[in-house]
Image: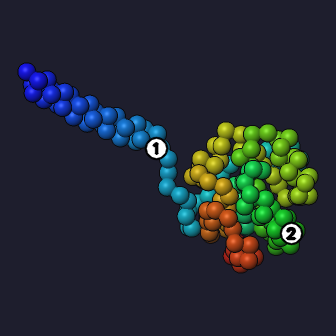
Amino acid sequence: MDSLKKRRFLIRLFVLTVLACVLLTAGWKLLNEGKSQKLEAGEKAPDFVLENIQTGEKFKLSDLKGKGVLVNFWATYCEPCKQEMPVFEEAAPTYEKQNVILAAISADQSSLVINRFRDRYDLSFPLLQDNGNQVMEAYSVDALPATFFIRADGTISRTVYGPLQIEKLEKYLDEIVP
Protein backbone atom coordinates (compact mmCIF):
# COMPACT_ATOMS: atom_id res chain seq x y z
CA MET A 1 0.00 0.00 0.00
CA ASP A 2 2.86 2.39 0.74
CA SER A 3 4.28 1.98 -2.75
CA LEU A 4 0.85 2.73 -4.29
CA LYS A 5 0.54 5.96 -2.25
CA LYS A 6 4.09 6.90 -3.17
CA ARG A 7 3.38 6.28 -6.85
CA ARG A 8 0.19 8.39 -6.76
CA PHE A 9 2.08 11.14 -4.97
CA LEU A 10 4.82 11.16 -7.62
CA ILE A 11 2.27 11.19 -10.46
CA ARG A 12 0.41 14.10 -8.85
CA LEU A 13 3.68 15.95 -8.25
CA PHE A 14 4.65 15.45 -11.89
CA VAL A 15 1.25 16.69 -13.13
CA LEU A 16 1.40 19.73 -10.86
CA THR A 17 4.93 20.52 -12.05
CA VAL A 18 3.85 20.34 -15.70
CA LEU A 19 0.82 22.56 -14.98
CA ALA A 20 3.00 25.08 -13.16
CA CYS A 21 5.39 25.24 -16.13
CA VAL A 22 2.48 25.74 -18.54
CA LEU A 23 1.02 28.52 -16.37
CA LEU A 24 4.38 30.25 -16.00
CA THR A 25 4.97 30.13 -19.76
CA ALA A 26 1.48 31.47 -20.49
CA GLY A 27 1.92 34.23 -17.91
CA TRP A 28 5.27 35.24 -19.38
CA LYS A 29 3.76 35.42 -22.87
CA LEU A 30 0.86 37.55 -21.62
CA LEU A 31 3.20 39.94 -19.83
CA ASN A 32 5.32 40.39 -22.93
CA GLU A 33 2.43 40.47 -25.40
CA GLY A 34 2.45 43.63 -27.47
CA LYS A 35 5.98 44.60 -26.51
CA SER A 36 7.97 45.35 -29.59
CA GLN A 37 11.59 44.85 -30.43
CA LYS A 38 14.10 47.61 -29.77
CA LEU A 39 13.94 50.40 -32.33
CA GLU A 40 16.91 50.42 -34.66
CA ALA A 41 18.51 52.58 -37.32
CA GLY A 42 16.36 53.15 -40.40
CA GLU A 43 13.03 52.75 -38.60
CA LYS A 44 10.56 55.62 -38.34
CA ALA A 45 10.65 57.24 -34.92
CA PRO A 46 7.27 57.01 -33.17
CA ASP A 47 5.58 60.40 -32.96
CA PHE A 48 4.65 61.78 -29.55
CA VAL A 49 3.29 64.88 -27.89
CA LEU A 50 4.51 65.79 -24.40
CA GLU A 51 4.55 68.93 -22.31
CA ASN A 52 7.76 70.94 -22.12
CA ILE A 53 8.02 71.48 -18.36
CA GLN A 54 9.96 74.75 -18.77
CA THR A 55 7.43 76.45 -21.04
CA GLY A 56 4.22 74.46 -20.54
CA GLU A 57 3.95 74.21 -24.34
CA LYS A 58 3.28 71.02 -26.23
CA PHE A 59 6.33 69.39 -27.80
CA LYS A 60 5.38 67.28 -30.82
CA LEU A 61 8.10 65.30 -32.57
CA SER A 62 6.43 65.45 -36.00
CA ASP A 63 6.42 69.27 -35.82
CA LEU A 64 10.22 69.07 -36.06
CA LYS A 65 10.26 67.42 -39.49
CA GLY A 66 13.18 68.89 -41.41
CA LYS A 67 15.31 69.08 -38.26
CA GLY A 68 17.53 66.53 -36.61
CA VAL A 69 16.40 65.52 -33.11
CA LEU A 70 18.21 63.87 -30.23
CA VAL A 71 15.69 62.24 -27.88
CA ASN A 72 17.14 61.14 -24.56
CA PHE A 73 15.18 59.10 -22.00
CA TRP A 74 16.43 59.81 -18.48
CA ALA A 75 15.50 60.20 -14.80
CA THR A 76 16.80 62.32 -11.95
CA TYR A 77 17.84 59.20 -9.99
CA CYS A 78 19.93 57.81 -12.89
CA GLU A 79 23.65 58.39 -12.31
CA PRO A 80 24.74 58.07 -15.98
CA CYS A 81 21.91 60.49 -16.88
CA LYS A 82 23.34 63.04 -14.45
CA GLN A 83 26.70 62.78 -16.22
CA GLU A 84 25.17 63.21 -19.68
CA MET A 85 23.01 66.26 -19.00
CA PRO A 86 25.77 68.90 -18.69
CA VAL A 87 27.31 67.61 -21.93
CA PHE A 88 23.93 67.82 -23.68
CA GLU A 89 23.51 71.36 -22.34
CA GLU A 90 26.89 72.34 -23.73
CA ALA A 91 26.08 70.88 -27.17
CA ALA A 92 22.49 72.16 -27.44
CA PRO A 93 23.11 75.80 -28.50
CA THR A 94 25.72 74.84 -31.11
CA TYR A 95 23.55 72.19 -32.72
CA GLU A 96 20.35 74.22 -32.47
CA LYS A 97 22.02 76.68 -34.88
CA GLN A 98 22.45 73.70 -37.23
CA ASN A 99 18.75 72.69 -36.96
CA VAL A 100 19.27 69.89 -34.46
CA ILE A 101 17.05 69.90 -31.36
CA LEU A 102 17.96 68.10 -28.15
CA ALA A 103 15.02 66.93 -26.03
CA ALA A 104 15.13 64.92 -22.82
CA ILE A 105 12.14 62.82 -21.75
CA SER A 106 12.03 62.17 -18.02
CA ALA A 107 10.65 59.01 -16.49
CA ASP A 108 10.16 60.89 -13.20
CA GLN A 109 6.55 61.30 -12.15
CA SER A 110 7.01 64.65 -10.40
CA SER A 111 7.55 67.86 -12.35
CA LEU A 112 8.86 69.43 -9.12
CA VAL A 113 11.73 66.92 -9.04
CA ILE A 114 12.45 67.53 -12.73
CA ASN A 115 12.43 71.31 -12.23
CA ARG A 116 14.86 71.04 -9.33
CA PHE A 117 17.15 68.92 -11.49
CA ARG A 118 16.87 71.45 -14.33
CA ASP A 119 17.79 74.30 -12.00
CA ARG A 120 20.67 72.38 -10.44
CA TYR A 121 22.23 71.61 -13.83
CA ASP A 122 21.09 74.89 -15.46
CA LEU A 123 19.47 73.11 -18.41
CA SER A 124 17.87 75.11 -21.21
CA PHE A 125 16.94 72.49 -23.83
CA PRO A 126 13.41 70.98 -23.76
CA LEU A 127 12.72 68.74 -20.76
CA LEU A 128 9.62 66.65 -21.25
CA GLN A 129 7.67 64.58 -18.78
CA ASP A 130 6.38 61.15 -19.79
CA ASN A 131 3.65 60.51 -17.21
CA GLY A 132 2.59 56.91 -17.57
CA ASN A 133 5.73 56.09 -19.59
CA GLN A 134 3.71 55.78 -22.82
CA VAL A 135 6.49 57.27 -24.96
CA MET A 136 9.07 55.05 -23.27
CA GLU A 137 6.93 52.06 -24.21
CA ALA A 138 6.52 53.28 -27.79
CA TYR A 139 10.31 53.48 -28.04
CA SER A 140 10.75 50.12 -26.25
CA VAL A 141 12.92 51.71 -23.57
CA ASP A 142 13.35 49.42 -20.59
CA ALA A 143 16.48 50.90 -19.02
CA LEU A 144 17.87 54.40 -18.61
CA PRO A 145 19.48 56.26 -20.19
CA ALA A 146 18.51 55.59 -23.79
CA THR A 147 19.24 58.02 -26.61
CA PHE A 148 17.77 58.17 -30.11
CA PHE A 149 19.32 60.22 -32.91
CA ILE A 150 16.55 61.07 -35.39
CA ARG A 151 17.19 62.37 -38.91
CA ALA A 152 15.28 65.26 -40.49
CA ASP A 153 13.05 62.76 -42.34
CA GLY A 154 11.89 61.24 -39.04
CA THR A 155 13.89 58.02 -39.26
CA ILE A 156 16.25 56.83 -36.58
CA SER A 157 19.92 57.28 -37.43
CA ARG A 158 21.31 55.63 -34.31
CA THR A 159 20.23 54.34 -30.91
CA VAL A 160 22.37 54.20 -27.81
CA TYR A 161 21.00 52.05 -24.98
CA GLY A 162 22.78 52.77 -21.73
CA PRO A 163 25.32 55.48 -21.02
CA LEU A 164 26.37 57.49 -24.05
CA GLN A 165 30.09 57.70 -24.62
CA ILE A 166 30.44 61.45 -24.44
CA GLU A 167 33.36 61.57 -26.89
CA LYS A 168 31.02 60.12 -29.56
CA LEU A 169 28.17 62.60 -28.99
CA GLU A 170 29.43 65.17 -31.49
CA LYS A 171 29.93 62.51 -34.18
CA TYR A 172 26.41 61.15 -33.66
CA LEU A 173 24.90 64.64 -33.68
CA ASP A 174 26.76 65.46 -36.90
CA GLU A 175 25.05 62.43 -38.48
CA ILE A 176 21.62 64.04 -38.01
CA VAL A 177 22.42 67.61 -39.07
CA PRO A 178 20.06 68.28 -42.00
Q: Quadrant of residue 170?
A: bottom right
Local crowd size for mark 1, using a 10 Å CA cut-off: few (<14), some (14–19), many (≥20): few
Residue in the foreground of this view, choosing between 33 and 48: 33
Q: Residue at x 7, y 21 (%)?
A: 1
Q: Residue at x 70, y 76 (%)?
A: 168
Q: Badge 2 is on which residue?
A: 90
Q: Quadrant of residue 84?
A: bottom right
Q: Which quarter of the figure is the C terminus placed in?
A: bottom right
Q: Position of residue 28 (x, y in %)?
A: 41, 41
Q: Residue at x 74, y 72 (%)?
A: 166
Local crowd size for mark 2, using a 10 Å CA cut-off: few (<14), some (14–19), many (≥20): few
- Vertical comparison of 14 with 124: above or below: above
For marks 1 and 2 on the same chain, the one whose residue lies earlier in the sequence:
1
Q: Which amino acid type is marked by label 2?
A: Glu
In terms of secondary structure, where does tag 1 sit?
helix
- Vertical comparison of 94 with 109: above or below: below
Q: Is residue 71 visible?
A: no
Q: Is residue 31 visible?
A: yes
Q: Badge 1 is on which residue?
A: 32
User: Total number of numbered labels?
Assistant: 2
Q: Position of residue 49 (x, y in %)?
A: 72, 46
Query: Do the residues bearing badges 1 and 2 touch, measured as CB atoms within 8 Å?
Result: no
Q: Which amino acid type is marked by label 1?
A: Asn
In terms of secondary structure, where does tag 2 sit?
helix
Q: Residue at x 82, y 55 (%)?
A: 126
- Vertical comparison of 156 with 116: above or below: below
- Classify residue 92 as left or right of residue 156: right
Q: Residue furthest top?
A: 1
Q: Position of residue 74 (x, y in %)?
A: 72, 54
- Classify residue 64 as left or right of residue 3: right
